[in-house]
Image (tube, rainbow, N blue to C red):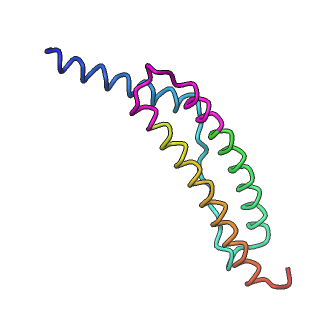
Amino acid sequence: MNQISLAVVASFAIFMSGTAVAQSTCDRPDNINIPDGASASLDQMIEAQNGVRGYVSSMEEYLECMDEIIEDADEETDADTVNNWINQYNSGVDEMEATAQRFNEERAAYQQANPSQ
């Protein structure tokens, strides 16, 4: 293997090891299903509300973990790896906000469809 190929393989291995560290130490929670508020039962909406609370709590733990990994990166950490971690963090924030927004929209639809509750 020539020196250029060896350098490319080594760089890729370092990049992948950094990604693996973040993925193995920070468990990103699965997003949850939110029912259609216009047709959901009260029990389904309460279950969704509890699910959103649990999801947000788990996502906040994940974000704290990712933040620690990003902050602990040293000068030897490849810039692409750090950027990947930052993108994972930002994606988590976006997903969490979108989930909360979606629940609030479905809650409003439920309240509109069930004004007496």
Residue drawn at x 54%, y 29% is: 24
- In the depicted structure, whether residue 101 falls above or below residue 84: below
Q: In the depicted view, which residue is nearer to us: 77 or 109?
A: 77
Examine the rendered structure and indicate whether residue 29 appears above or below residue 32: above
Q: Quadrant of the C terminus?
A: bottom right
Taking depth in this image into account, of 44 and 98 the one nearest to the observer is 98
**Residue 97: x, y in percent?**
62, 58
Q: Nearer the viewer, residue 5 or 48?
A: 5
- Range covered by the magenta-colored residues: 64-83
The image quadrant of residue 103 is: bottom right
- Residue 41, position in %: x, y? 75, 73
The verdict on residue 74 being magenta is yes
Furthest toward the left, the residue is 2
Residue at x-position 62% and y-position 40%: 63
- Identify the residue shown where x is 69% and y is 79%: 109
Magenta portion: prevailing SS class: helix
Residue farthest front in this picture: 75
* Quadrant in which residue 50 is drawn: bottom right
Query: In which quadrant of the rendered image does the N terminus lie?
Result: top left
Q: Position of residue 84 (x, y in %)?
A: 44, 38
Residue 97 sits above or below residue 74 on the image:
below
Q: In the image as oriented, which residue stretches furthest toward the right?
A: 116
